Image: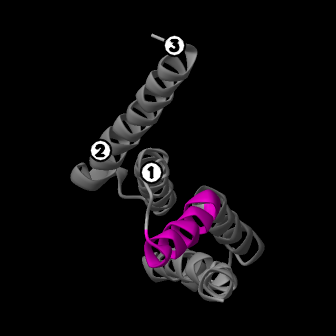
Amino acid sequence: MNLYNILTTVQDTLYATIIFIALIYSCLIIFLRRFRHRNNIFILNLCISVIFTGIYFIAYFYVIYFNISPPLCIFFHYAFNVASMEIGFAFLAFTIHRFCSIIYHTKPFFKTKRWVAICIISQWIGQFVISLPFVFAQQNEVFS
């Protein structure tokens, strides 16, 4: 076994372990009612981000060695940009939630699950929109 195969095995093992731990943690939050607190919902969002990022990078490193078509290549570059900022944006959404709930502690809106949903949904929409220019730049390079 050469060094490349060993490193690939270690990489896959680490990704699988991280995905497994995030999956267990997210299942605890989903299935145990006492863990459904506002802050734990953000941790669930972070776990989902970790799971999607790990799955994407496992798929990416296996598909990159195949000769893929240009539209699929554009999709993989778009998904790469989304996956690379997904975890950071999940932390940013939690930070904005904590900031607003501390600064505006007298406002009951910032203590509701509706506010949590707004933060998380805006985080996901934001990361998909911010990655769109990469698609159009890649599309112009591939098809010109």
Q: Nearer the viewer, mark 2 or mark 1?
A: 1
Toward which corner of the image does residue 33 lie, by quadrant? Answer: bottom left
> What segment is highlighted magenta in the picture?
69-85
Q: Which residue is mark 2?
A: 28
Where residue 2 is drawn, which disc sits there? 3
- Give the CA separation, mark 3 to mark 2: 39 Å
Density class for disc 2 (Cα within 10 Å; few <14, some 14-19, many ≥20) is some
Q: Main secondary structure of the magenta part?
A: helix
Query: From mark 2 to mark 1, how far is it between C-alphas?
Result: 11 Å
Q: In what quadrant of the picture does the C terminus appear?
A: bottom right
Q: Inspect the magenta stretch and tell me whether residue 82 lies in it.
A: yes
Tell me how far mark 1 sits from mark 3, CA to CA.
33 Å
Residue located farthest toward the top when viewing the structure as drawn:
1
In the displayed image of the protein, which residue is found farthest to the right? 103
- Element at badge 1? helix
Q: Is residue 54 above or below residue 84?
A: above
Residue pictured at 50% horizontal, 75% vertical: 70
Q: Secondary structure beneath disc 2? A: helix
Say few, some or many: other residues with alpha carbon within 10 Å of mark 1 (under 14 / 14 to 19 / 20 or more). many
Is 55 positioned to the left or the right of 110 in the image?
A: left
Which callout, 1 or 3, points at the residue further toward the start of the chain?
3
Q: What residue sits right under mark 1 in the picture?
A: 47
Q: Describe residue 54's horizontal placement relative to residue 127 as left or right.
A: left
